[in-house]
Image (spheres, rainbow, N blue to C red):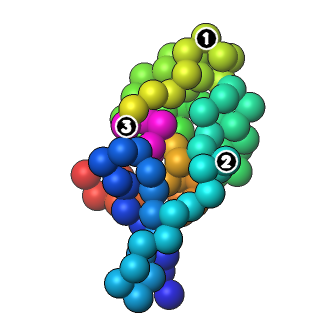
Amino acid sequence: MQQRLRLKADGRIVELRDGQEFPLAPAAQPTGPAEVRDLRRRAHLTQQEFAAKLGVPVETIRNWEQGKRMPRGPARALLTVIAHAPDMVFAALAKT
């Protein structure tokens, strides 16, 4: 069965099961340099490949991984969803 996730207006991510929403653990939000790097490595992607899949400049990925900048807003939410369902997210992004 495929996991269904929903991004709420307040930035929370919930899993949809049997018509109900179940919050995902907030600690899973990849917002620091080590978390972003780990997320990319678990996807077996280079910085260039990860940037291309997300549609951002490779400099953005480098800045996140080096701690020069932190993912915010939609980027942070997207990274959180990727942490929970990378195959589903990358498949959806490939269709755009």
Type of amino acid at the residue the image marks with label 2 = Ala
Mark 3 → mark 2, Cα distance in angstroms: 17 Å
Q: How packed is label 2: few (under 14 Cα within 10 Å), some, or many (20 or more)?
A: few
Residue 27 covered by magenta stretch: no
Q: Residue 28 has which mark?
A: none
The structure residue drawn at horizontal position 66% and vertical position 16%, both measured from the top left corner, is 67
Q: Is residue 19 above or below residue 56?
A: below
Residue under pointer 2: 27
Segment tinted magenta in the rendering: 74-78
Q: Nearer the viewer, residue 66 or 45?
A: 66
Judge from the rendering whether residue 66 lies leftward or rightward of residue 82; answer left or right.
right
Residue under pointer 3: 74
| Residues at circles 3 and 1 in contact by the CB criterion of under 8 Å | no
Mark 3 → mark 1, Cα distance in angstroms: 18 Å
| Residues at circles 3 and 2 in contact by the CB criterion of under 8 Å | no
Magenta residues: mostly which secondary structure? helix
Q: Earlier in the sequence, mark 3 or mark 1?
A: 1
Residue under pointer 1: 68
Q: Secondary structure at mark 2?
A: helix
Mark 1 → mark 2, Cα distance in angstroms: 21 Å
- Image quadrant assignment for residue 73: top left
Residue 53 visible at all: no
Residue 10 in the image, given as x and y percentages of width and height: 36, 45
The structure residue drawn at horizontal position 28% and vertical position 58%, both measured from the top left corner, is 95
Q: Earlier in the sequence, mark 3 or mark 2?
A: 2
Q: How packed is label 3: few (under 14 Cα within 10 Å), some, or many (20 or more)?
A: few
Q: Is residue 29 above or below residue 81?
A: above
Type of amino acid at the residue the image marks with label 3 = Pro
Q: Nearer the viewer, residue 7 or 58?
A: 7
Q: Nearer the viewer, residue 46 or 36?
A: 36
Of all residues, the one furthest to the top in this rendering is 68
Q: Secondary structure at mark 1?
A: loop
